[in-house]
Image (cartoon, rainbow, N blue to C red):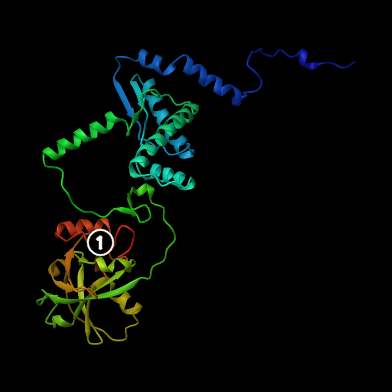
Amino acid sequence: MTTDYKETLNLPETDFPMKANLVKREPEILAQWEKDNVYASIREKFKGKPKFVFHDGPPYANGHIHMGHALNKILKDFIVRFMTMRGYDATFIPGWDCHGLPIEHQVTKEQREKKKTPSKSEIRKLCREYAGRFVDIQAQEFKRLGVFADWENPYLTMSYSYEATIVEELGKFAINGSVFNGLKPVHWCTSCRTALAEAEVEYADHQSPTIYVKFPVKSGLNGQLGNIDPTKVNFVIWTTTPWTLPANLAVCLHPEFQYSAVKISGEVYVVAEKLLSKLVSEWDIKEHKVLGSCLGKELEEVICRHPFVDRDSRVVLGNHVTLEQGTGCVHTAPGHGQEDYVVGQKYNLETYNPVDDGGGV
C-alpha cells in the first residue's frame, strides 16, 4: 500500500495559477488598465494637488522603438509614479520630434527603392505622413511597456499649433533684436547636404597624418623674445587635422605659458618652454640655442604669414591651449571647430571654411 503524502500536508489554498504566464496575462492587464482609463482616474484623484509636469524629451518618429527607447520611457515612468506617490498631480506629456534628417533619410530611401524622385514639397508631405505613422506605432509600443501617460494628447513638433508657437516666439526675439545672421561651424552631411545634430553623427575609423607646420613672422615681434631678427622667426604648430590648414586664420597661445625662441640650423622657432626638451628629442635635434622667452600674452597680435596661402595668420590667446601634446602653439581655423570659433569671435576673425556643401573645395 502506497501513501499519498501530499494529502497529509496542511497546505494553504489559493486561486493564483502556478504559472505567471506573463505572455498572456500582461496584455490582459494593460488592456484592463486602458478600459478602466487608469491614467485619467489618477489625474482625477490628484486634481488640485501640487503640480509635477513631466514633458517628454521627444524621440524621433522614424522607426520602431528599441532598447534605448524602452530604458528612457521606463525610467521616466518611474519618476512620474514616484512623484504621484509623494502626493503630486504628476502628469506625463509624451511627445515626438517629427522633423529632421532621420525622417527625411528614411523617406528618400523608400522613394529611391521605388525609383521615384519626388519634389521638395512632395518630400515634405511624405515626411509628415511617415512621421504620423510612426507616432501611432511608437505610442502603441510604449503603451505595451506599461507606461502611464497622456497618450491621447501628445505634443508633436509637426502640429500646426506647435509650429505657429515657434514662429510667434521667433517673432518676439526678432522684435527685441536678439536675432542675427551669422556663421558658425556645424556638423554637416556632405551626401545629404544638411546640418546634423551631434547625436546624428556616425564616426568612421580614419587616420590623418600629424604634422608640424611653421608660420613665419611678418610683423609685431619687437623684442618680446629678445634681440633677434624677426624675419627668421617662425611660430610652430602641430595638428592632427592637416586638411583644415587651408582655413587657418590664427595661431593660438596660452596667455600664461612661457614661450621660448629656439635657434635651430639658422632658423628660430617659437614653442612652449615646457615642451622644448620633448620636441628637441622628437625632431632629433643635435644642437639648439634658446635666444629668449616670454609669456604668451606678450606675443598677442604678432602677425604671421600663412605657410602656403597668401594671407595673414594672427597670434591670438586662448585658455584651451594645453601642454599635453604638440608645441603649445595651436593652429586655429574658426570655421572648423567650436573652440577655434569662440576664439575667432573674440578676435573678430572670419568664420572661414573653403569647403563647399558637397565636401569639395
The amino acid pointed to by label 1 is Asn
Q: Which of 312 and 105 lies nearest the eye of the viewer?
A: 105
Which quadrant of the structure image shows residue 274?
A: bottom left
Residue drawn at x 32%, y 63% is: 360
Viewer can see residue 230: yes
Mark 1 Cα-neighbour bin, 10 Å: few <14, some 14–19, many ≥20? some
Residue that label 1 marks? 353
Residue 355 point in image, percent of width and height: 29, 62
Q: Would you place residue 192 above or below residue 70 in this image? A: below
Which quadrant of the structure image shows residue 52?
A: top left
Residue 15 point in image, percent of width and height: 64, 13
Left or right of residue 121: residue 226: left
Residue drawn at x 51%, y 19% is: 31
Q: Would you place residue 71 above or below residue 290 in this image? A: above
Left or right of residue 245: residue 94: right
Viewer can see residue 255: no
Q: Would you place residue 316 above or below residue 30 in this image? A: below
- Where is the N terminus found, in terms of image quarters? top right
Residue 222 point in image, percent of width and height: 9, 76
Query: Across the whole image, how many numbered discs are drawn on residues?
Result: 1
Q: Which of 291 and 63 lies nearest the eye of the viewer?
A: 63
Left or right of residue 308: residue 9: right
For mark 1, give the secondary structure.
loop
- Where is the C terminus found, in terms of image quarters? bottom left
Which quadrant of the structure image shows residue 277?
A: bottom left
Residue drawn at x 37%, y 21% is: 84
Q: Which of 183 and 357 lies nearest the eye of the viewer?
A: 357
Work out which residue is located at the far right of the displayed protein and give it: 1
Left or right of residue 182: residue 237: right
Q: Which of 338 and 298 lies nearest the eye of the viewer?
A: 338
